[in-house]
Image (cartoon, helix red, strand yellow):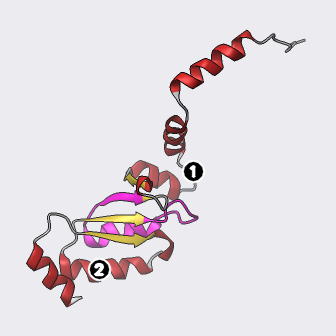
Amino acid sequence: MQELGDVKKEINPQEVLLVVDAMTGQEAVSAAEGFHSQVDLTGLIMSKMDGDARGGAALSITRVTGVPIKFMGVGERPDGLEAFHPDRLASRILAMGDILTLIEKAQGAVDEKQAAEWRRSFAKLPSTLKIS
């Protein structure tokens, strides 16, 4: 850990981010404390948030270290790094799901022009729905 402190002094970075595996749970708190005491963290990245972990350790880490969560990792590719939204994490921790992220992903996956074309095509189909 001392070597990390020495490296930080030498390169003087603008940001010092710790990547914490969301699956490790509360063990991540002591790891974050150790890193923070040596290198004065400026933020956290919670990885593996696309798995089963709800991210409860994130709240404990921010409480103990006083540093904010800046990003969440939700995949293996670079586009799997998302900005952190506290309200969405709260919904996830409370097992209410993260509907806003789902909507954003759906919007990103569907081409607006293609969707409009599909709507027009469906509107031209004959309606066979009868309500009695």
Could you tell me which secondary element the residue under label 2 belongs to? helix
Reading the image, the residue beneath label 2 is 33
Estimate the x, y position of residue 6 in percent, counting from the top left.
13, 85
Q: CA distance from mark 2 to mark 1?
A: 29 Å
Q: Is residue 73 left or right of residue 120?
A: left
Which residue is at a point 61% across and 18% down the rendered structure image?
117
Which residue is at a point 43% across and 81% down the rendered structure image?
27
Which residue is at a point 70% across and 12% down the rendered structure image?
123
Q: Are marks 2 and 1 in contact (CB under 8 Å)?
A: no
Estimate the x, y position of residue 91 in percent, counting from the top left.
50, 51
For label 2, the crowd category at 10 Å Cα-Cα, with few meaning under 14, some 14 to 19 and many 20 or more, is some
Q: Is residue 124 left or right of residue 17?
A: right
For label 1, the crowd category at 10 Å Cα-Cα, with few meaning under 14, some 14 to 19 and many 20 or more, is few
Tag 1: residue type? Met
Could you tell me which secondary element the residue under label 1 belongs to? loop
Count of numbered badges drawn on the protein:
2
Q: Nearer the viewer, residue 37 or 17?
A: 17
As drawn, which residue projects farthest toward the right? 132
Answer with mark 2 or mark 1, whichever residue precedes in sequence: 2
- Reply yes or no: does residue 48 show up in magenta: yes
- Relative to 15, say whether 118 is above or below: above
Estimate the x, y position of residue 95 in percent, counting from the top left.
57, 56
As drawn, which residue projects farthest toward the bottom? 2
Tag 2: residue type? Glu
Which segment is the magenta one? 47-72
Q: Nearer the viewer, residue 40 or 7?
A: 7
